[in-house]
Amino acid sequence: MRRKSSLVLLALAVLFAALSPLVRWYAFPRLAKIPANQYQDMVLEAKDATLLDYGTMKAKKVPKVTIVQTLKGNVEASEKIEETAGKDVVVWDGLSYVQGPDGKMVSRIPERYIFDAHTQEPVHATGEMVDGDPVRREGIEFKWPFLTEKRDYEYFDAQARITAPIHYKGTQDFRGVEVYYFEQTIPWTKVPFPKTMPVAGITPESVAETGTTRWYTTVRKFWVEPLTGAPVYGEEIHKEELRGGTLLGGREKVTAFAGHVKMREDYIEHTVDLVKSNRTLVLLMTSYLPWGFLVLGVLLLSLSLYLEARARRPADPAPTDATEPEPVTA
């Protein structure tokens, strides 16, 4: 009976020892992915910002500029692309909507971002665009890969339509979460005017006829939770200028927007809570289950060897029956 039990325990030990690396290196890369139907929004604010008044074409100080960013998973589009891509694909239809302190629109820039659901690498397909202009992204955008590393990444800038390094600057604690801090600087770059302008009758084409151009620079900062690859917080020191042309009335340049853009407090709290929850799920697949299975396998192996040793131990000699002494005869 002990021999049978030890063999069963040995088989279970081998099973759990094999499951340990399988969960970490086989199951996790295939199960960890961004859902195709994910929806998220975020509100950012630039307080005491500078904003261009298109009525007077002069820059003025305003108490606040609000940026609303939404990302909506397009399931129908992702399924269509998956048919030819041969991989799990996510399509995010994004919108960056900027409004002034009076609630009126400053700019409205739609975007379609197509990427691998597991690795977050771009997937190039019809429909990939920024503000209606076809683009071919290289590098990440919005989200880092699962198990983010302490290194620089290539990050796509939607304003300039270029990819540039975003540098790992160190590990920090952000509201009880260990995060990696990344920073990217985009130098002054000539960028297109938004297709939707804030003043009726003004179009990118009509502005281009005046010879005026739009320029942009930013310092982009992200605090990223490394297990999930999700930013828990972000900031931008953002500047835009209009330069040259007859639209400026002989001036060399005028500030179109300048401000320190930060996530609104309520969205910070929501994002931190969400990332903490998702972090537990990633830990389950990358640490808790693999190490738990390995420890359980070692314990089962030890118990199996113990029972096997007990089964092989020689049995104690059987006791002899006591006999009555026979009488001695003469």
Image (cartoon, rainbow, N blue to C red):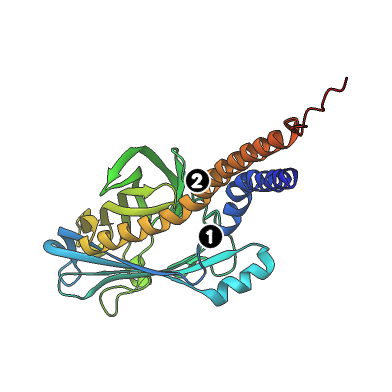
Mark yes or no: residue 41 visible. yes
Q: Residues within 10 Å of mark 2 (few under 14, many from 20)?
A: some
Q: Is residue 263 left or right of residue 149?
A: left
Instruction: Left or right? Give the position of 252 relative to 322.
Output: left
Q: Residues within 10 Å of mark 1 (few under 14, many from 20)?
A: some
**Residue that appears at 39% across and 39% down:** 168
Regarding residue 70, the answer to whether it shows in the image is no
Q: Is residue 277 above or below residue 81?
A: above
Identify which amino acid the numbered label 2 is placed on. Answer: Ser
Which residue is label 2 attached to? 287
Separation of residues labelled 2 and 1 (CA atoms)? 17 Å
What is the three-letter code of the residue carrying label 1?
Lys
Q: Horizontally, is 249 left or right of 38 in the view?
A: left
Residue occupying the point 58% across, 52% down: 29
Question: Which residue is most to the right?
Answer: 330
Q: Kindly state the secondary structure of the residue where label 1 is placed.
A: loop
Q: Are marks 2 and 1 in contact (CB under 8 Å)?
A: no
Q: Give the x, y percent position of residue 229.
A: 43, 51
State the residue at coordinates (57%, 53%).
28
For disc 1, the marked residue is 33
**SS under mark 2:** helix
Q: In which image quadrant can residue 246 be found?
A: bottom left
Q: What is the x, y in percent for residue 175?
A: 25, 49
Q: Nearer the viewer, residue 155 or 212?
A: 155
